[in-house]
Amino acid sequence: MARKTTSADCRTVRTTSLLLMPLLSALVATAATVVPTPVAALPLLRSEVAESATQPPAVGRPRAATGGQPVATPAPNGPRVPNEMGRFPIVEWHQVVEKDGTYKVSRERFKAELTELHRRGYVPVNLSEILDKTFDVPAGKTPVLFTFDDASPSQFRYLERNGQLVVDPSSAVGILLDFIKAHPDWKPKGLFCMLPAAEAGHAFFGDKGIDGQKTAWRLKKVQFLHTQGFELCNHTLWHAKLSKYSDAVVQEQLARGAMAIDSAVPGYKVRGLALPYGLWPKNRALTLKGSWYDKKAKKTVSYAHEAVFEVAGGPARSPYDPQFNPKALPRVPLQGGTKLTTTLDAMDKPGSKWARFVSDGNAKVIAKP
């Protein structure tokens, strides 16, 4: 669905609609999600140890924790002025565990960040809706894209109960789904940037008994996310530092990453790539398109990404902004010492260079300030 050009005549209607924004309701749901019988898993390869301070390692010794919770601040009073040329956050989580640390947030903090985004009028959208400009955000609200990197068990764990698999309510997926059940104005949307063959359990959310996760559950987890409405993203095969490898290895990493997702969800179109460690390959064009010859299957595997995610950089430009560049999308990383509130406050500050995207609720108009 294409969007259109600005109409100044709609300003009065937009402003009035903002004064009638719906109230939010919450009913906590406790039912566990039951999933079908698990399927076969992928072969485990290897992973690299991180060297860059700008991107989390997929494996290795965790760095020192810094702790701390986001500080709640009052949401802006009154209706927001429509501005669909403003910025929106692409938030980035890694491990959701007991305590804050480098590339880690506590479960309590993760819940608090979801609560703060909801309270401030943010609505989850999918990557495909951003690329296709089809997201439907209510008047006065702002889109937010959730991204989860590295496919750790802390993001998605299964529990076995009475012979059935259920989502662990203390994992990030369990927490998020429970939050959505309690806040029906949110839908299961977001992007999981996955590793299919990394070590230390970072292989489609866990294997080899790490964190209680069985290898046979891996593809079933990917399928579950897809059926819920979340989207799937390439993060290479085993978190390779693309900057240090030849063009051939880069293409193998990306082609096999996409192929693994296809093995779980046949025919799935992988539209996004998250750069491991935030490192670009020498040939940047290979992040968007390339191929690899599978000698075992005797066939060529091709991939094509439309969006490439960096590690940081702040809120992203509106997809209606002429300078919007999906080939290098900035993100807002959330971890030990990096707080969500800081970015959201800056987006609400009058005259800010990061002034937030605010929907006018009218699919026929691109509202400009």
Image: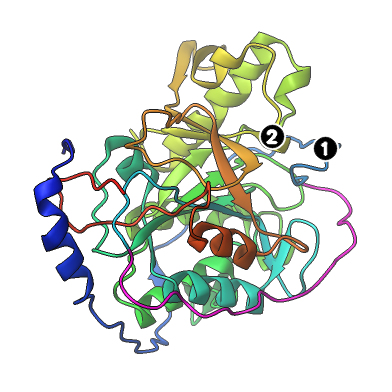
Numbered label attached to residue 278: 2
Residue 306 x, y percent position in the rendering: 42, 27
* 34 versus 202 height, above or below: below
Q: Examine the rendering and report whether any part of residue 285 can be seen.
A: yes
Q: Is residue 68 magenta?
A: yes
Most foreground residue, 90 or 228: 90
Horizontal relation, residue 242 to residue 31: left or right: right
Circle 2 packing at 10 Å, graded few (<14), some (14-19), many (20+), is: some
Q: Are marks 2 and 1 in contact (CB under 8 Å)?
A: yes
Q: Is residue 63 magenta?
A: yes
- Measured as percent of width and height from the top left, residue 244 is found at 78, 19
Q: Is the magenta stretch mostly helix, strand or loop?
A: loop
Q: Nearer the viewer, residue 300 or 273?
A: 273
The colour mode here is rainbow
Q: How many numbered marks does the figure carry?
A: 2
- Dot 1 falls on a residue whose secondary structure is loop
Specify the segment rendered in magenta: 59-80
Report the residue at 47% width, 38% height from top.
261
Residue 288: x and y in percent read 49, 20
Which residue occupies 83% across, 43% down?
53
Residue at 54% from the left image edge and 13% from the top image edge: 285
From this viewpoint, is residue 40 visible? no
- Per the model, the C-alpha gap separating discs 2 and 1 is 8 Å
State whether residue 156 is above or below residue 31: above
Q: Earlier in the sequence, mark 2 or mark 1?
A: 1
Within the image, what quadrant is residue 304 found in?
top left
| Quarter occupied by residue 208 | bottom right
Task: Tell me, for residue 73, which label it has, or none.
Answer: none
Mark 1 residue crowding within 10 angstroms, few (<14) / some (14–19) / many (20+): few
Name the kind of residue labelled 1 in the image: Ser
Q: Mark 1 points at which residue?
A: 52
Question: Looking at the picture, does residue 146 appear above or below residue 118?
Answer: above
